[in-house]
Image: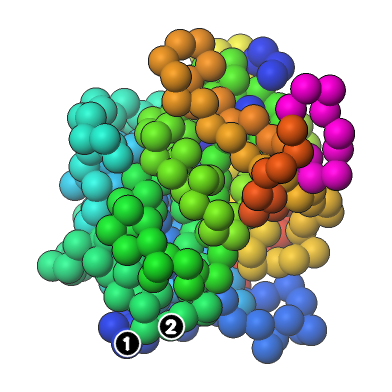
Amino acid sequence: MKKAISLLLVGALVFMSGCSVKVNFRSDSDNVNHKVIIDTDTGADDGAALILAASAKTIDILGVTTLVGNVDLEQGTKNAIAALEVAGCDAPVYKGSEDTYNGRIVDAFSVFGEDGMGDANLIHPVGEAKEQDAVSFILDTVRNNPGEIEIVALGPATNIAKAIKEDPETMKQVKMIWSLGSAGLGPGNATPVAEFNVYHDAEAYKVMLDSGLPITVVGLDSCDGEAQWTGEQFKELEASGKAGKFITASFAKIREFYANNGAGDNVMNCDPALVMCLADPDFVKETVSVHGSCITDEGETYGQVIFYKEGFTYDVAQNDFDYNVTLVSNVDKAGYFTRYKETISK
């Protein structure tokens, strides 16, 4: 979850030193091996997602790339390294964009606290980021593993858009981009219609959607309702082990934010839901093939993503789109927390 909450309804160089700590829900998916780059603006929710990815048997993290979003680039990079270390993962981390696709500097403000991780004195990483920049790492890794690399985008699309601009032919070799972006078919959080990751750099999100690359989008509507984590569940998580304690502490400020916003003790935690869709196919209950259009005109709808369903005839809009987006429209919300806790506890 990023930024303010709206209650209104409207949406090689291969570095094989990646993670080896693995668990899984399904024995029949033991032969599945997702080679991923995780792109993150690491706040508490991204940290929880990184820990899940590092713990999932089906995922190999080849590298983590960072960018400004929840917090500034330097803080987000430290947060990513700290979260990986908690999970026992030595995947390399590469710093990326500290501005937007068009060069606009955005002052990072986080509802997760000044450090993005609950201001709980959690961030003391031992490791450091690599010297190579994020975009060149993405391109090198895709170039040397054509058709095999999946990018898990937990933050704004800036690094991805810059990679597309620099070398579109190489980026055509990406197997899948998994994006935590848009409101899905529900309300936004940055504005009533826009989700924070998209709103932070809508121009970059538009470049990504318009690229024709295969994209799976998980919106805010996949982590609302029954998928929200309760106060009792956070107590369970805290008692589950080192990683659970870290995650619970990192959510202290966002839980205060929700309570002060009249949302009680329940908190949306969307980024791990995206990773869960990749790690555990049974978590996904329904998807729809769509064309995604991102609004970049300044105004009330800036950052909104409009989805046109394949096979649906609209009264005015022509259906001559490239339906390159798979929108996750339903997940196992009731089982989300249990699946998460069982994975990171092992």
Rendered image quadrant of residue 37: bottom left
Note whether residue 298 is visible: yes
Give the residue at x 43% y 44%: 207
Element type at mark 2: loop
Q: Is residue 73 left or right of residue 22?
A: left
Give the residue at x 32% y 63%: 167
Residue 179: in magenta span:
no
The percent coordinates of residue 156 (x first, y second) are 41, 42
> Where does label 1 land, which residue?
12
Who is closer to the viewer here, 326 or 291?
A: 291
Q: Would you call the spot at circle 2 few (<14 residues within 10 Å), some (14-19), or many (20 or more)?
A: some
Q: Do residues under tags 2 and 1 come within 8 Å of each other at their CB atoms?
A: yes
Residues shaded magenta: 309-317
Q: Quadrant of the image for the C terminus?
A: bottom right
The percent coordinates of residue 104 (x first, y second) are 23, 29
Note whether residue 330 is visible: no
- Determine the CA span between mark 2 and mark 1: 7 Å
Which colour style is shown? Answer: rainbow
Q: In this view, does 298 lie to the left or right of 182?
A: left
Can you tell which mark lies on residue 145? 2
Residue 316: in magenta span:
yes
Three-letter code, disc 2: Asn
Three-letter code, disc 1: Ala
Q: Would you call the spot at circle 1 few (<14 residues within 10 Å), some (14-19), or many (20 or more)?
A: few
Give the residue at x 34% y 37%: 69
Q: Earlier in the sequence, mark 2 or mark 1?
A: 1
Rendered image quadrant of residue 117: top left
Q: Is residue 185 above or below residue 157?
A: above
Who is closer to the viewer here, 345 or 302?
A: 302
Element type at mark 1: loop
